[in-house]
Structures are given as structure tokens and as C-alpha cells.
Image (cartoon, grey):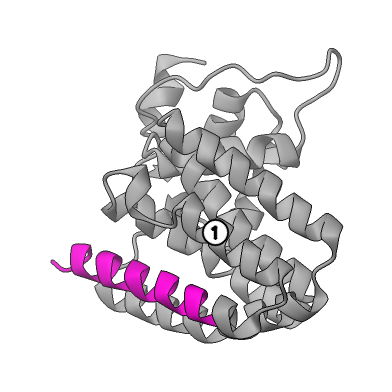
Amino acid sequence: MTARALHRNSVITALPAMRLVAGKKPSVDDIYPRLFDAILEQRIAPASRFTEEGLGEIFGVSRSVIRRVLAKLSHQQVIILRPNQRAQVAAPDARQTRQILEARRLTEIMVVQLACAAATPTQVRQLRELIARERDCIERDQRAPAIRLSGEFHLQLAAIAGNAPLAQFLNSLVPLTSLIIAQYETQACTYCTWQEHLAMTDAIEQGDADHAVNLMTQHLNHLAHRLTRRAQP
């Protein structure tokens, strides 16, 4: 990694080495969480511009891999891609934040209802494993992975619900919410806590849709209050 690449891409600090199987080239699935975490940590700062070539050098992968990762992040609205321009990290304002959270509230009420009716014991166990990883990151003060895993919990609920259009819609809202949290919240414990996720999982396991909906509504209302207040100019 060169100093020129670091300067050009507004990357604040060096990224940790990847742990990969010997002889295996990093894939999109390897690079995506690292690039997303770098954005959440503001190692790649909001409104900074960067190139496929520069990111490929930083992460030690080809431009084609970076291009696919950027395409995924663009679909999730975390970054902005425009023809003949460098990619740019999104920077939602207070109005956009309110609209995103309003859309999430309406969508996730239905998602959690469907999840209560559809969740299998294996899926509930997977949710608990995800919560355990989130809790571990919070306790280790690993803020960016904790934020990302918090979002993945909501996306996993959408997958369990079994409604593809709803899941696709949330996939364009939840990662963007993670970006907003990273930009406006200062501590990992102030947003989607693992305790709240655990309570929702308990309600889903019991098939208690009314309680699960109440928990989700309170959860998102609290998040909306905090984020829209902090996003005010």
C-alpha cells in the first residue's frame, strides 16, 4: 500500500491484514465487509472520492473485484456511482434519514410478523449466533463491525420472512441506516443493541407476533429519534 494511494482515497489508517486460506484470492465476500467497515469507521471519509485502482491497491485485489463490491454498495446506497466520476460515500441529511427510517418502520413491521410465522429452529439459532457476534464486537469496542452486524440482523429477519421484494427493499435501506449511525452516533451501545435483538428473537421463537411488532416499533422509533436529532444542522 503506497502513501499516494492512502492520500488519494482519504483512508485515515492502514487496514488490518486479511486472514485467508493459503493460495486463495480475496473474493467479493472477503472484501465487502472490510470496505464497508472502513467506510463505517470513516477511514474512507464521508464525501471523499476514490478510485477502483486505488482501492484495489489498498485491499490487494483486482479492479474487477473492487468494481463488484462497489456495485453492491451502490445498490445499497452506501456509495454513489456516477458515469465518468469517482465513487463517493453517501452523506444522508436529516430529511433523508427520516424518510429512510419511516420506510423501514412500515416494512419491518410486516417482516417481523412474517418471521414469527415462518422461523424454523435452525433460523432462530442462526439469529442468536449473529447476536452473539454483535455482542462480542460491542464488548470489544469494535464499533464498525458491531454496526454492520446489527444491520445484518435485520436483513436476516427479512430472509426468514420469505418475501423477496421486502428483503430486496430492506437491503437498500438497512446498510444505508448503518452508514447514518456511523456518521451521527458516537458510541456502539447507543443504537440497535444486542439486548433488543435478543428480545425480538425470543418473541419470534415463541411465535408472539404482537410482542415482536411492539418491540420492533419501539426499537425503530428510538433509533429514529436519536438519528434525526443528531442529523439536524
x, y percentage for residue 158? 69, 71
Image quadrant of residue 97?
bottom left
x, y percentage for residue 56? 61, 30
Apparent side of residue 18 relative to residue 42 in the rendered image (left or right): right
Residue carrying label 1: 197
| Picture layout, residue 175 above or below residue 32 | below
Q: Residue at x 50, y 35 (%)?
A: 137
x, y percentage for residue 141? 40, 31
Answer whether residue 81 is visible to the viewer in this image. no
Which region is colored magenta? 213-233
Q: Nearer the viewer, residue 7 or 95?
A: 95
Q: Nearer the viewer, residue 206 or 218?
A: 206
Apparent side of residue 222 relative to residue 105 in the rendered image (left or right): left
x, y percentage for residue 153? 61, 57
Please state which amino acid type lies under the numbered disc 1.
His
Quadrant for the C terminus, please. Answer: bottom left
